[in-house]
Image (cartoon, rainbow, N blue to C red):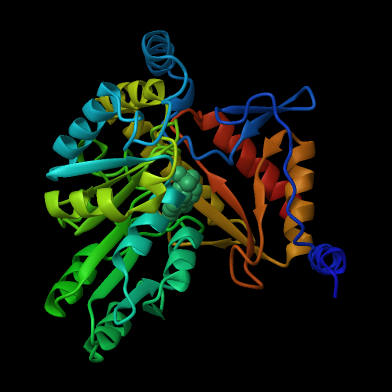
């Protein structure tokens, strides 16, 4: 089969199973409203949980950073790309989360890939929650280590796997808040099982950081554990983009030698690091935003429980409504869009077959009226 035939076949398969992915151009997509084709929609798809992507102080910090440093970093951090703005941000993050070191990355995807690739060797075993993000599972699959996935949030299944003798080291991987289900990992028990087996724990807290715990310190802090490797990302509650790995001095120095995504990739612009420092400031003082978000979650769940759709036991900003079939999910999303609500239909392979869903994300910027309007439309469309 030629390249062209192979590509055509794969695209045809996606079309036939209603799982073709497309992108929609918007005029503004991260805030409370998403504007598409000149029409304003209430946005229930953005991960901007605290509404910081439009925050004037953060926007201003980026502008001032660009005026001071220019718009690009000029190279990898190992060459010219590690500015005083990057250095300051890393120190602030390490201090906030109580780690010796933080290392900035251009994205969470890159951070996860880099850490796993740099650490895992042939004789090692990686134990990852089945529902871990693609960036984690893919890196683990590509690594020379053995990958075993454990049933979602099942600590006993994890402990059983950890008990199987392993020639090398064991790395347990999970998330603070799961990206497609919104539920949380029992981090305390996972950390304990990992510690007993002499392994290391890596937690990706992309969706918990900024939102959970005192001063928004995230899932691990909330559950009183300190993973050996904590990955936080800045594209969600921080409202920007990028990521950081929190770790010990030795691990940071090791990653500076062996994390190829750091060494061979242009560092984020210094102005972005300035914006992230400003975002961190807002997050630390952000109790009111976090409390508005919690109220919105509670309001949504109370009413959504009456819908003839599956509501997952999630108490975070991610509130998926399970529809089941791809075609039905797509048509429900399209009808809601007609009515001015922007929700994304998430389908396999992102989620297991038969569990296509509307991934509702709530933010601190939504008002009670926004949520009531969405629920009314959902009631109408699923009657
Ligand atoms: C759990 C999780 N980890 C990592 C990522 C990737 O982060 P980034 O968008 O910064 O690449 C995402 C999604 O974006 C995610 O949901």
* Location of residue 61 with respect to 249 vertically, above or below: above
The residue under the point 47% across, 26% down is 53
Q: Count every numbered label the image shows and give the total.
A: 0
Q: Quadrant of the N terminus?
A: bottom right
Question: 143 or 237, which lies in front?
Answer: 143
Q: Position of residue 114 (x, y in %)?
A: 38, 55
Rendered view: 307 above or below 35: below
Residue shown at the point (33%, 67%) measured from the top left: 173
Q: Quarter of the image holding residue 185? A: bottom left
Q: Outermost residue, front direction?
A: 79
Q: Is residue 8 above or below residue 232?
A: below
Indicate the position of residue 250 as horizontal and vertical percent values.
Answer: 14, 53
List x then y, in percent, for residue 111. 38, 50
Q: Horizontally, is 122 left or right of 3 in the view?
A: left
Quadrant assignment, res 69 = top left
Quarter of the view holding residue 182: bottom left
Write the residue at 19% across / 49% down. 253
Give the x, y percent position of residue 143: 42, 71
Is residue 258 visible in the rendered image? The answer is yes
Choose between 186 and 17: the one closer to the eye.
17
* Point 16% across, 80% down: residue: 197
Lateral position of residue 336 relative to residue 288, left or right: right
Could you tell whether 293 is left or right of 165 in the image? right
Please state if 261 lies on the left or on the right of 29 as rendered. left
Tell me the quadrant of the picture where the C terminus can be found.
bottom right
Image vertical order of residue 140 relative to residue 344, above or below: below
Residue 302 in view in this figure: no
């Amino acid at each position: 089969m030629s390249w062209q035939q192979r590509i055509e076949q794969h695209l045809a398969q996606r079309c036939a199973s209603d799982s073709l992915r497309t992108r929609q151009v918007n005029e503004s997509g991260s805030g409370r409203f998403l504007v598409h084709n000149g029409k304003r929609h209430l946005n229930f798809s953005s991960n901007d949980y605290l509404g910081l992507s439009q925050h004037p102080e953060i926007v201003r910090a980026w502008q001032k950073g660009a005026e001071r440093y220019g718009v690009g970093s000029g190279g990898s951090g190992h060459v010219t790309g590690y500015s005083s703005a990057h250095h300051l941000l890393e120190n602030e993050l390490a201090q906030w989360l109580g780690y010796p070191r933080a290392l900035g990355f251009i994205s969470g995807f890159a951070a996860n890939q880099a850490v796993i690739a740099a650490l895992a060797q042939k004789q090692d075993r990686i134990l990852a929650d089945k529902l871990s993000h693609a960036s984690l599972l893919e890196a683990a699959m590509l690594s020379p280590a053995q990958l075993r996935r454990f049933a979602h949030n099942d600590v006993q299944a994890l402990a059983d796997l950890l008990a199987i003798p392993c020639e090398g080291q064991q790395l347990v991987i999970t998330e603070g808040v799961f990206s497609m289900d919104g539920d949380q990992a029992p981090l305390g028990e996972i950390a304990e099982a990992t510690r007993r087996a002499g392994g290391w724990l890596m937690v990706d807290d992309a969706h918990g950081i900024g939102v959970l715990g005192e001063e928004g310190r995230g899932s691990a802090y909330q559950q009183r554990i300190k993973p050996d490797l904590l990955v936080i990302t800045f594209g969600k509650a921080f409202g920007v983009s990028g990521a950081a790995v929190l770790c010990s001095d030795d691990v940071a120095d090791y990653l500076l030698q062996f994390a190829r995504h750091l060494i061979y990739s242009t560092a984020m612009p210094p102005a972005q690091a300035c914006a992230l420092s400003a975002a961190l400031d807002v997050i630390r003082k952000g109790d009111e935003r976090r409390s508005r978000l919690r109220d919105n979650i509670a309001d949504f769940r109370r009413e959504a429980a009456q819908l003839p759709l599956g509501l997952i036991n999630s108490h975070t900003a991610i509130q998926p409504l399970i529809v089941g079939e791809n075609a039905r999910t797509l048509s429900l999303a399209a009808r809601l869009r007609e009515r001015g609500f922007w929700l994304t239909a998430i389908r396999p392979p992102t989620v297991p077959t038969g569990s296509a869903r509307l991934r509702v994300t709530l933010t601190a910027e939504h008002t009670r009226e926004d949520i009531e309007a969405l629920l009314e439309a959902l009631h109408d469309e699923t009657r």
